[in-house]
Image (cartoon, grey):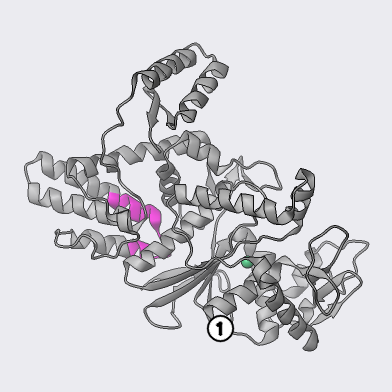
Amino acid sequence: MLRLHDTATGTVTDVAYRNPGEASLYVCGPTVYDAPHLGHGRFALVFDVLRRYLHFTGVAVTYVSNVTDIDDKIIERAAERGVEPGELAQTYETVYWEAMDALGVLRPDLTPHATAYVDDMVGLIGALVERGVAYETDDGVYLSVADVPGYGLLARQPLESLRAGARVEAADVKRSPLDFVLWKKAKPGEPTWPSPWGPGRPGWHTECVVMSLDLLGEGFDIHGGGIDLAFPHHENERAQAVALGSDFAHHWVHNGFVVVDGEKMSKSLGNFTSLDDLLARSDARAYRLLVLRSHYRSPIEVPPATTAQAEDGLPRLDGVARRFGLPDLLADGPVTDGAAGAQAVDADAVEEFRRRMDDDLDTPGALAAVFDLARRANAADDAGDHEAAARAATTVGLLCAALGLSLHTASDDALDADTAELVRRRDGARADRDWALADRLRDELVALGWVVEDGPEGTRVRRP
Ligand SMILES: [Zn+2]
């Protein structure tokens, strides 16, 4: 039985499904106004692992993750670039999915877009006004949080202390500083939709309420996202659902930050490293491994050295795949625990893996068990116990597949003469500490379609 931390109660509890054997998940997706950073990669990987693990244990998963394609930041950035907001959003949505594909993150079953749900959002806001919990001002429509029972559940703070900490702006038209905008009346030059309160656009917190209830129905199982979304975004989503009398998410799951020098990584702080940078410099699987090595609720630091360290774990697993000729179990999508077919698996190891994962997704523990198994496979083979070795190796392949970690069995790509020459020159430039030349030669290799990695023995290249 899977147990997960629930932000609403602050405790690790059983995940009870609305329909036995079926899990419904809603995870807040990206606002597409820039290239995705490592924080996006982390939430996507964490929930990809959760989704794959549920599938592994025989639970049928419906995974919905939205795309926010209209927002202040999109409008601002589009104006800076002199393009339409819709065009900018489309561009960065494409970039987002390319990065997710590179990370091996499964595409959601459903990907609702905010702009496709505006009419439904207008309907929801209208219902809130009718119930007397939302009010109109000169610039929009707001939800009165004092009229929502239990506001502060996800912040884990009572309304009074939230109110004491809230920033009051001089020009505020709101009745209370915690009230949040549901509908923004049009400003010149912005995209607008019609509404009973005049042309405008919805605030960010309404879309996920409408889309999750529409696609997953009342009382869906798990609502997730990065911990920075717990308050106010998820609190405000929940407040709308509660005010409408809807049965909303039953379990709230949040992953920790990616931090740089102790500070949260975010675009607004300007300290983000793009996923593209990471993917150009290291094996895409290294980030999955790095994410798995930390508990999903802990913050992670991602300096370059850490990525290199995570990358060092990959050859140990790939080595087992090569030595024992393991098949690529992920070729046909996520696996179930029967994916090894007629091949014997180490049932105790699978049970240990499940015990770890069921315990609030203890991926560091589960991964340690997989590495231990890899060591045992090699040791048994060295000792001539080929049956035990094969069983352990098959299990390594199965459990890596359960975590979405593909293993490479092919030996290094053969290098053509031109590539070999570029690699040789680049190693020379690095030895001479001529970083500009080394960077230029790396760019040449990338242009030839190679992924370039800096290993202890110098430049390594491989096909993506
Ligand atoms: Zn959301």
Residue at left offset 68%, top offset 66%: 115
The answer to whether any part of residue 156 appears in the image is no
Residue 437 horizontal side relative to residue 151, left or right: left
Residue at left offset 7%, top offset 46%: 385
Q: Nearer the viewer, residue 1 or 419?
A: 419
* Image: 63 above or below 43: below
Secondary structure at badge 1 equals loop
Q: Measured from the top left, where is residue 370 in percent x and y?
A: 28, 51
Image quarter for ligand 1: bottom right
Residue at left offset 28%, top offset 43%: 317
Q: Which residue is mark 1?
A: 218
Residue 380 horizontal side relative to residue 122, left or right: left
* Image: 227 above or below 410: below
Magenta highlight: main SS: helix
Q: Measured from the top left, where is residue 98 in percent x and y?
A: 51, 49
Residue 141 horizontal side relative to residue 449, left or right: right
* Image: 371 above or below 66: above
Q: Nearer the viewer, residue 295 or 454?
A: 454
Q: Which residue is at the far left?
A: 384
Q: Is residue 91 magenta?
A: no
Q: Nearer the viewer, residue 9 or 438?
A: 438
Q: Measured from the top left, where is residue 450 in percent x and y?
A: 42, 31
Placement of the N terminus among the 4 image quadrants: bottom left
Q: Is residue 367 magenta?
A: yes
Q: Quadrant of residue 249?
A: bottom right
Q: Measured from the top left, where is residue 309 in percent x and y?
A: 41, 36
Point out the stretch of residues depicted in magenta.
355-370
Give, as a three-letter code, the residue at label 1. Glu
